[in-house]
Image (tube, grey):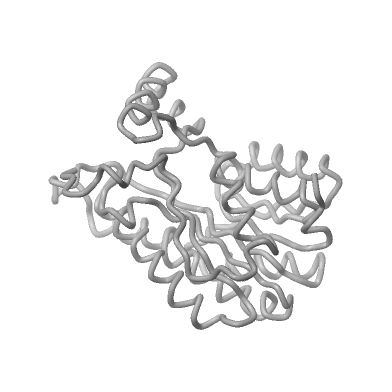
Amino acid sequence: MEQQLKGKVAIVTGSASGIGASVALGLARRGANVVVNYSRNEKDAKDVAEQVKAAGVRALLVQADVARDEDCRKLADAALKAWGRIDILVNNAGTTKFAAHTDLAALSSDDWQTIYGVNVIGPFQMMRACVDALKASGDGAVVNVSSVAGVMGVGSSIAYAASKGALNTLTLSLARAFAPEIRVNAVCPGYVATPWFSGRFGEENSKRIASQQADANPLKRVAYAEDIADAVLFLASPAARNISGEFLLIDSGMHLNMTGTKR
């Protein structure tokens, strides 16, 4: 694989599993040194860090909750102390609470604050913590992992959809503010078949959900973590040097069927 990111330094928040882990490994295979971040899942994060090192680059394992500004600064400082630079920031850490959109009593103010703290304030704080280093890079790139929920107003809960919509507007605002030194883009996945679903719903139910999702979209397939990682890696790479302030929907065409959807 071409080492197009050789010598660069990347931070991937929420990279213990799923999309974040796939992004961290993809960056490593392209030559970047990677800060692997976790909030609670230390065991899997250590495994990802070892896989990053096995790709022939260096890895740092940093525990941090992106909802806390001091933890965001800790992540940036760790990269700068180790390598003296930050070239790529992938804001992948996210959270949700499942609640029907019609059940307005299902979410407390604490639920909203928790979801916004991780999904919106966290990426802002990470970008603020890294902005000077990203500018100094000369080719800084930020990729926010958003969701089709933020475009279509669907998904696991109203708070989740609203938070991802806010992340999309944050992407636009900071793409303007950080130009010309830093590009800021977002990927907006639909359903992604990750181990999280089998862990939450069980193996059989997760297979059923995946099958239903595939049947419901025009391309008749679901995405996997590696598919989303490929898009993130493209937007982080020199190949996307002329792209900023974009949302890339990765949902097998699901959004084409969502007009007027009631959730």
Q: Residue at x 64, y 80 (%)?
A: 181
188 or 79, nearer to the observer: 188
Using residue 166 as the reference point, say whether residue 239 is left or right of it: right
Measured from the top left, where is residue 62 in percent x and y? 67, 55
Q: Residue at x 26, y 48 (%)?
A: 154
Measured from the top left, where is residue 222 in percent x and y? 44, 33
Figure quadrant of the N terminus: top right
Q: Residue at x 70, y 70 (%)?
A: 77
In this rendering, the count of numbered labels is 0
* In this view, 98 is above or below 118: above
Using residue 183 as the reference point, say whether residue 134 is left or right of it: right
- Determine the image quadrant of residue 11: bottom right
* In this view, 29 is above or below 242: above
Please identify the residue farthest to the top as the structure is shown.
204
- Determine the image quadrant of residue 4: bottom right
Figure quadrant of the C terminus: top left
* In this view, 50 is above or below 129: above
Measured from the top left, where is residue 18 in percent x and y? 55, 39
Using residue 41 as the reference point, say whether residue 53 is left or right of it: right
Q: Residue at x 37, y 58 (%)?
A: 164
Measured from the top left, where is residue 83 in percent x and y? 82, 67
175 or 221, nearer to the observer: 221
* In this view, 138 is above or below 61: below
